[in-house]
Every structure is written in structure tokens, then in C-alpha cells.
Image (cartoon, coloured by chain):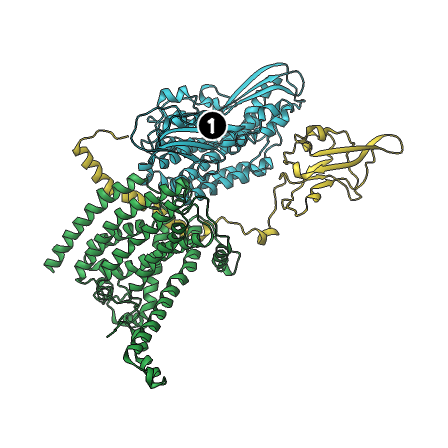
Chain colours: A yellow, B green, C cyan
């Protein structure tokens, strides 16, 4: 990568760099000094301390949840749209039959371990029965807790 | 007769007290020789402890400081969890490092592999022994201080070369070779700048160099010789950064290129030793810069008597460490600002820029000495 | 060491008295930007030849797509080039729109352009950080990521996720933008202008950066075309090609922006082109903020995602380069085959050409300026 230049050009470039070089370095140093002496620029969040004020956005895609009213009733009809929409088979809708012989939701099994929280199930649900909650502290020490049944009650149909 | 003599104030106290204590011994074994030997040994132990305390004690502080400086430059907070503002974090890290299993990859030259970190540690420790920390606080007040420092400083590269070579790793070897080439080159300008200082002060004794800078701030080497002193200081700063293998001259480690360079394969305590050596070198080089350019343990008197009396009330050792830590802060700011040059650029910078400038500096220094 | 036979992939035969050796760079190496393995044939510190080995995180995305619905593939496209996930979403959505024969309302076009340009800035900021970081200035890395976090905050508010956005759908998007989107983008742009001044002062004129990058890793015009490079890498080699200008999609034809190019095709040019692109993106965003329709539908009439049988191709300009999606549709909601043309793969192919005769340090610089994303190479 050596280019051919005359001695005069070389000396000219050498001297030029002796001046512009340190100047450019000083410019760089001025930026770091500015940042060093300006604590307002710090962007770190003190996470466990700011837990109370830390709110996820409304659309944040956390764990899957069932939309339930106060009595624990849900809107799920066990149609299985979410199950089909899921790219990695994290949802397993197990229907059952109620007294009238109609297909209702028996158990809504959700494998959190394989869920990528893409939100396609929520999008696919025609009844608005599921949503993604804002919970973001999802780590657990017991892998069996990752497999959950989302509905509290069997479906009413 | 056996007369071990290291002239320093602590030693004098010891030499005074040993004969007094010896009187309690049976007369049969009392002798001048024994007294001087015991005095020497006690003296040596005290010196070793003092040097270790200053050096090893400052390492955790420096690691903490480096983390905080780096964090604040990068708009972060740095360690905040353990202790007040993360003060105990470094202790925890050091403990972790010490409790780690020490193992070596297959095919290493074991003796050299484990010797290398020890050799690396020698150089900064020996330099620390020569630095006058206060008017009466110096371990070894030798007349050939500067030449000894230049000689001893070259020792560090041996450890790095050995460590890199014996690791049986190509990255380590590349790092070691880079480091060898770099440190040997920069040693020259490092020595040249110290020679400049010697030329101005007319002494190679570090205590004499410090004493020659007594007076006001303007008597410090950095301002004593107008402009040239400051340039010399900058040159010393650059070459000592390269000597220490610190960023931006850390091509021997070059994490992004060589995944850690010569200490890629080290874990646990041997790695901690490399790490320690780096930080002790930081202290000693800062101390050297302080001694040679920033007036050592002298207070920054400004020539106004009212202020100067107050400044002089602060002990010299405090001023010394204040200056040392300021220098360390400068080294850190530089480290976290600049990017790393390539190996060949580093070399051409030394041989094509630093060395010629150093030679010119020496000539100007000689003219200055001749004229004033 | 005399080599009677070179390891696979190495081709150059040379007469030399020096001892050659081989170094594996990666798959676990700080500056290969992921699980990429580069086999280096070296003479001292000089690289004679380089053979890239991909596939450490190959997930068979294109094969998987055959058993997926179209919508699921949009979610999958996030996982290709994760730095420009939102743009990949758009690329897939555009191809699907062609198959479904639908368009999107004006408001949605603005949403798309704005989010894509935000994504472009985010990706280029990662480049800025990694470039500085790979040269040895760790501070630069953090500087780049600081502003990127702000973009990700905006993206999270709009799409629900920071990286894997999964946002655009054929005929619209998942949601409308929230009310405070425009003010937020505005305040971000103001902040960004300030920061960019600092960052350019910090790195662009720095003499060490210039020494390290000028004249390093030169990719000639002809080579750039021959290897199929695109995006900033191609433009740095002096070819004025940008899909947004040459084959405009969305509403880029109505917006005013320049395509920054350079001449030499070295690392510094690639860096400069990307920095100029950040400024151009900010210019586009400013225009969009001004023109953003306050009213109007944000998506076309909802239809099931079913494509007519046929072949559909869409190409967009992501931050890395040309991102093409080729859909061979069988009737129904599943594709017969989806092929993705990613920008990083050809760049890595050109690496061998660029790196010959340089040192390991230069390889790191060149890798940084190619800005490859390994999951997108492996797919």
C-alpha cells in the first residue's frame, strides 16, 4: 500500500501531520472531558432500585395472558387460531365440551420456554381473549413453572 | 567488615535501635557484625513491606478508579452495587481472581509459563523502591537512580515475551512479539527524555532531581525550561504510555485483534499478576513523571507567602500522591479516548517522530544548560 | 514448515522462504461480530489469504419458511439481520403485498419510512460504535449504543419490542403509531444532531483513525459489482446505487435526500458514507415529521394473508444494503419457497479480496467497516 511520493511531498505531509494530528487528538480528548465532567449525561438506569417507577410501554410484549374479568371469565372459544398462528408451537389449546355439548375451552396450555413473544397469537385471536402483559421479570429457577395454564376457569362458551 | 548500607531515614532509626536492643543479649554473641546484619535484615523487611503496601495497596484503588473514570467518560455510572458506590467491587473481583483454578493449556512450557508473571512484577516493584515519596521517605536513595530505572524497566518486556512464547498459542506469540518490538523501541525515547531531565538538573539521583525543583510551581521541570519542558513532559507521557503497554499503545494485548495478546491463556492468579503489574507500572510511571516533571513532593507554591505557608503545611507525601493520582487520571482519560494505532504505525511513530524530536530536545537542553 | 497441500479453501500458491502459519480467527473472537470463523494464512503478521467459514448459527430459515405461514415468516425475518429488523419486516411485507395485490394508505407509508429510517440510524450507530471499538476505542462503542437505545425506546413504544419488532404486515402494520410518536422523534432528532457533532469530532478527524483506515481494504468498483456488494460498501466504492433512488419503494420518491458516495472504497470511505447516511436519514425523518398526515387510515382493509400462486420479488435498501425477498407462492397461506437475498453475505465473500497483504489489525478494521451481521449470513 505504499504510494510513490517525492521527498518534498513527504516532508510537507510529515509537517502537516505534526500539527493536524495532535489537534485532532485534542478534539477527541475535549469530547471525553466534556462527558466526564457532565454527570447529567449519564444514561444508566439503576435497575432494581427504580423498579417502582419502571413501567413498560403499553404495547410491550411480555408473557402471554388471558383477558379475564373479575370473576375469571374469559372470551376464549377454543377455536385454536392462536395455536395455528404460533410459529413455534408454544400454545396448546385443549377444548372440552360443556353440559350443552358445545366445544369450550378446557385448558389453555402455554409453553413459555419456547415462546419468542412475537405476538402473532394475540393478533390472530378474533375475540380478543389473550394479550401480552407488561411483565418483564420472567426469569425463574424452576423450569416447570414455564409451562402454564392460562385460564382459571373452563370456558363458558 | 560487612557494612550493608541503604541510606534512608527508616534505616537510620533501625540502625540506632538494633545495638540498644542487642545489649539485652548474652555478651558472648554481641558483635558489631551481627548488629549490622540484623539491622540490614529488619531494614530490608520494612522496605519490602512498604513497597508492597504502596504498590499492591494502590492496585485495587486504581482498578476502581479506572472503572469509574471509564464509566463516566462513557456516560455510565460504573460499579454501584457492592459497598458505597461500588467501592468493595474491586476487592470482590480480586478475591474471585485469586480463588480461580490455575490451569495451563496443553503443551505449554510450564516453568516459563509460571515464571513470566513473576518476572513482569519485578520491574515496577524495583522502580517503586527508587522513588522519593517524601523528603525523608525513600527506600533506596541511590546515586544512579535514573540509569537503574531505565535498566530495570526493560525487564518487564522479558516477562511478556516469555509469557507469550510459552503459552503455546499463536495469538499470544503475536502479542508477545509485538510487545517486544514496541517496548524495546519506546525504551529509547523513554531513556532520552529522562536523560533530558538529568541534563537540566545535573544529577541522576531522584532525590536530587526532586530537590532541584523546590520553590514555586515555576521551578518545576515542566515550567522551569519554558515550552521545552512541557514538550518533554508530553513526550515522556507518550513514551511511558507505550512502556506500560497501556491503551492507546496496547497493541500487545489488543483485545479486538489478538483476544488478549500475551495473557490470552492465563487464568486466576497468574493473570492477576499480569494485571497487577500493569497497574503498578501505572503508579511507578506516574510517580516518575511526578518526580521528574511535577516537582515530586513539593507543594505547588505560587510565590505568594500567605498561600504558600498553608500549602506547605500539607505533608509532602500527600502532595506527591495527589500529583501521582492526577497523572494516573490523565493516563486513564487518554486510554478511554484514543483508538489504537497499528503495529507498523506505532513503530514508525517512534522512529520517525518521537526519536528525532527527542534528539532535538537533547540538543536544546544542552544549549539551555550552556546558556543559563 | 513446508506445505505439500494447503488446507481446503486456500488457493494461492507462492514461493517464499518465510514460514507461513495458519490462524483461526473465530468462531469465538471479539471482533468477528458473531460466530464467524475466518481461517487466516499468515506470513508474520501479514495475511496472505483468508477463508471465511460460515454456518455456526445456521437455522435453515428458508427451509423453515416452507412450513410456515407468511405472517410467521415476518416474525422470522426479525431474526435475520437483527440490527435492521424493522426494515426486514418491510421487505417481506412488500413482497407479500405484491402477491396480495394491495397497497397501503399514505399515513402507513410515512410510518414505514420513518421507522425504517430510525432503524437505519440505529444500525449505523452500531457500526459507528463497533468501528471505534474494534480500533481499540471502547468509549466509542458506548457512545454509539447510547443513542441507539433511544431509538429502541421509540421502537419499543411503537412496536412492542426493541429488536425483534415484527411490526409491518401486508396492507399496513400491527398498530397505528401512538400519539406522542412524532414529538418523540422530533426530540430525538434534536438530541441526535448534537450528539453527532460530538461523535464526528471524536472519531472522524482523529489522526489515528485516519491512519488506520485510509487506504486499507480497498474494494475497487469492478470488484464491488462482481461480488454483488450493496449498500454503503458499494457506494463507498464509487457506485451511486441506492434502491431508494433507483427502484423506489414506499414514498421514497416523494422525499428529498441524497445518496452519499465516495471514491476510493477504503475503510475510511465506508465509514464516511455511513456517517453521511445518518445525516441523510435524519433529513428524511425531518421531512416526514413535517409531512406526517395527522388523519387518515393507517392500514388498508384487513384481508387474510393469502397470496395468489406466482412469484413475487421485493427489494429494499436496509442499512446494510440490498435486502431482497423472493416469494414463490403456492395458493393458500403458506409459501412454496421464500428466498432471501441478504446484504452481508456478499460482503464477507469480498473480504478475502480486500484483506490480502494487510495485517490482522487491518482485518479487524475491514470487518468492522463491512458491518456484517452473522445471523443474516447464516440465516
Give the x, y percent position of residue B225: 18, 58
Residue situated in front as seen by the camera: C326 or A3: A3
User: Quadrant where the N terminus of chain B lies?
Assistant: bottom left
Q: Is residue A153 above or below residue B335?
A: above
Give the x, y percent position of residue A132: 67, 38
Horizontal placement of B354 versus C222: left or right? Answer: left
**Residue under mark 1: which chain is it in?**
C
Q: Is residue B342 above or below residue B298?
A: above
Q: Is residue B39 above or below residue A19?
A: below
Residue placed furthest toward the right: A99
Q: Could you classify mark 1 by the number of other residues whose Cα lies within 10 Å: few (under 14), some (14-19), or many (20 or more)?
A: many
Is any part of residue C194 visible from this angle?
A: no
Q: Residue at x 20, y 35 (%)?
A: A10
Give the x, y percent position of residue A118: 63, 34
Horizontal placement of C335 versus B320: left or right? Answer: right
Residue placed furthest toward the top: C310
Q: Residue at x 60, y 51 (%)?
A: A51
Q: Residue at x 33, y 75 (%)?
A: B38
Give the x, y percent position of residue B162: 35, 48
Q: Circle 1 — which element?
A: helix
User: Quadrant where the C terminus of chain B lies?
Assistant: bottom left
Q: Quadrant of residue B318?
A: bottom left
Residue situated in front as seen by the camera: A133 or B185: B185
The residue identified by callout 1 is: C344
Amino acid at each position: 500500500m505504499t504510494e510513490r511520493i517525492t521527498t518534498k511531498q513527504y516532508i510537507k505531509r510529515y509537517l502537516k501531520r505534526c500539527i493536524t494530528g495532535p489537534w485532532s487528538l485534542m478534539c477527541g480528548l475535549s469530547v471525553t472531558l466534556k462527558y466526564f465532567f457532565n454527570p447529567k449525561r449519564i444514561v444508566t438506569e439503576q435497575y432494581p432500585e427504580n423498579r417502582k417507577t419502571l413501567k413498560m410501554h403499553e404495547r410491550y410484549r411480555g408473557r402471554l395472558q388471558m383477558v379475564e374479568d373479575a370473576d375469571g371469565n374469559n372470551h376464549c372459544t377454543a377455536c385454536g387460531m392462536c395455536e395455528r398462528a404460533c410459529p413455534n408451537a408454544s400454545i396448546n389449546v385443549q377444548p372440552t365440551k360443556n353440559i350443552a355439548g358445545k366445544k369450550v375451552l378446557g385448558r389453555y396450555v402455554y409453553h413459555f420456554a419456547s415462546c419468542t413473544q412475537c405476538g402473532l397469537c394475540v393478533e390472530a385471536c378474533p375475540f380478543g381473549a389473550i394479550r401480552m402483559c407488561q411483565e418483564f421479570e420472567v426469569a425463574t429457577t424452576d423450569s416447570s413453572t414455564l409451562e402454564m395454564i392460562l385460564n382459571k376457569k373452563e370456558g363458558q362458551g | 567488615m560487612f557494612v550493608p548500607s541503604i541510606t534512608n531515614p527508616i534505616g537510620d532509626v533501625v540502625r540506632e535501635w538494633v545495638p540498644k536492643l542487642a545489649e539485652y543479649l548474652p555478651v558472648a554473641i554481641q558483635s558489631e557484625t551481627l548488629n549490622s546484619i540484623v539491622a540490614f535484615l529488619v531494614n530490608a523487611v520494612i522496605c519490602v513491606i512498604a513497597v508492597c503496601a504502596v504498590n499492591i495497596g494502590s492496585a485495587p484503588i486504581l482498578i476502581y478508579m479506572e472503572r469509574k473514570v471509564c464509566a463516566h467518560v462513557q456516560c455510565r455510572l460504573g460499579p454501584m452495587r457492592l459497598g458505597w458506590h461500588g467501592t468493595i467491587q474491586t476487592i470482590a473481583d480480586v478475591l474471585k481472581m485469586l480463588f480461580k483454578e490455575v490451569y495451563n493449556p496443553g503443551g505449554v512450557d510450564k516453568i516459563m509459563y509460571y515464571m513470566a508473571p513473576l518476572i513482569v512484577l519485578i520491574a515496577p516493584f524495583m522502580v517503586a523502591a527508587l522513588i522519593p515519596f517524601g523528603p525523608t521517605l525513600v527506600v533506596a536513595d541511590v546515586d544512579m537512580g535514573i540509569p537503574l530505572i531505565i535498566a530495570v524497566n526493560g525487564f518487564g518486556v522479558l516477562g511478556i515475551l516469555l509469557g507469550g512464547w510459552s503459552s503455546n498459542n499463536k495469538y499470544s506469540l503475536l502479542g508477545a512479539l509485538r510487545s517486544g518490538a514496541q517496548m524495546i523501541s519506546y525504551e529509547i525515547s523513554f531513556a532520552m527524555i529522562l536523560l533530558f531531565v538529568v541534563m537540566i538538573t545535573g544529577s541522576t539521583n531522584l532525590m536530587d532531581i526532586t530537590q532541584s525543583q523546590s520553590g514555586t510551581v515555576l521551578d518545576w521541570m515542566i515550567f522551569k525550561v519554558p515550552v521545552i519542558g512541557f514538550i518533554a513532559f508530553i513526550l515522556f507521557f507518550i513514551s511511558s504510555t507505550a512502556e506500560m503497554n497501556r491503551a492507546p499503545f496496547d497493541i500487545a494485548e489488543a483485545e479486538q485483534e489478538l483476544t488478549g495478546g500475551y495473557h490470552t491463556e492465563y487464568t486466576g492468579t497468574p493473570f492477576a499478576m499480569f494485571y497487577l503489574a500493569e497497574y503498578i507500572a501505572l503508579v511507578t510511571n506516574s510517580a516518575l513523571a511526578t518526580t521528574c516533571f511535577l516537582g515530586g513532593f513539593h507543594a505547588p507554591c505560587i510565590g505568594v507567602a500567605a498561600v504558600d505557608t498553608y500549602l506547605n503545611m500539607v505533608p509532602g507525601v500527600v502532595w506527591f500522591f495527589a500529583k501521582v493520582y492526577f497523572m494516573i487520571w490523565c493516563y486513564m482519560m487518554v486510554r478511554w479516548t484514543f483508538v489504537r494505532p497499528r503495529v507498523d504505525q506505532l513503530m514508525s511513530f517512534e522512529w520517525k517522530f518521537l526519536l528525532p524530536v527527542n534528539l532535538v530536545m537533547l540538543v536544546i537542553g544542552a544549549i539551555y544548560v550552556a546558556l543559563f | 514448515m513446508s506445505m505439500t497441500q494447503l488446507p481446503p479453501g486456500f488457493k494461492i500458491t507462492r514461493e517464499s522462504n518465510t514460514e507461513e502459519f495458519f490462524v483461526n480467527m473465530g468462531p469465538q473472537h471479539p471482533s468477528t461480530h458473531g460466530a464467524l470463523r475466518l481461517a487466516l494464512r499468515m506470513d508474520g503478521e501479514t495475511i496472505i489469504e483468508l477463508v471465511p467459514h460460515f454456518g455456526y448459527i445456521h437455522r435453515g430459515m428458508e427451509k423453515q419458511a416452507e412450513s410456515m405461514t407468511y405472517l410467521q415468516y415476518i416474525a422470522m425475518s426479525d431474526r435475520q439481520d437483527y440490527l435492521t429488523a424493522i426494515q426486514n419486516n418491510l421487505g417481506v411485507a412488500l413482497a407479500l403485498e405484491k402477491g396480495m395485490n394491495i397497497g397501503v394508505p399514505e399515513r402507513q407509508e410515512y410510518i414505514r419510512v420513518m421507522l425504517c429510517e430510525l432503524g437505519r440510524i440505529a444500525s449505523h450507530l452500531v457500526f459507528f460504535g463497533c468501528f471505534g471499538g474494534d480500533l481499540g476505542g471502547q468509549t466509542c462503542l458506548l457512545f454509539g449504543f447510547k443513542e441507539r437505545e433511544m431509538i429502541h425506546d421509540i421502537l419499543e413504544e411503537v412496536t412492542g419490542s426493541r429488536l425483534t419488532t415484527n411490526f409491518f404486515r401486508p396492507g399496513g402494520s400491527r398498530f397505528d403509531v401512538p400519539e406522542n410518536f412524532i414529538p418523540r422523534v422530533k426530540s430525538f432528532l434534536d438530541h441526535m444532531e448534537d450528539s453527532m457533532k460530538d461523535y464526528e469530532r471524536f472519531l472522524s478527524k482523529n489522526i489515528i483513525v485516519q491512519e488506520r483506515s485510509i487506504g486499507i481494504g480497498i474494494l475497487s468498483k469492478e470488484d464491488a459489482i462482481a461480488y454483488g456488494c450493496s449498500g454503503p460498501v458499494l457506494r463507498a466504492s464509487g457506485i451511486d446505487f441506492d434502491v431508494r433512488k433507483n427502484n423506489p419503494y414506499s414514498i421514497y420518491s416523494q422525499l428529498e435526500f441524497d445518496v452519499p458516495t465516495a471514491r476510493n472504497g477504503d475503510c475510511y470511505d465506508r465509514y464516511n458514507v455511513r456517517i453521511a447516511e445518518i445525516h441523510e436519514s435524519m433529513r428524511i425523518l425531518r421531512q416526514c415529521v413535517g409531512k406526517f398526515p395527522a388523519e387518515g387510515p393507517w392500514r388498508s382493509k384487513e384481508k387474510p394473508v393469502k397470496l395468489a400462486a406466482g412469484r413475487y420479488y421485493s427489494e429494499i435498501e436496509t442499512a446494510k444494503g440490498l435486502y431482497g425477498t423472493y416469494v414463490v407462492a403456492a395458493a393458500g397461506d403458506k409459501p412454496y419457497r421464500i428466498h432471501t437475498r441478504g446484504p452481508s453475505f456478499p460482503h464477507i465473500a469480498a473480504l478475502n479480496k480486500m484483506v490480502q497483504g494487510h495485517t490482522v489489525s487491518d482485518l479487524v478494521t475491514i470487518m468492522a467497516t463491512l458491518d456484517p451481521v452473522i445471523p443474516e449470513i447464516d440465516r
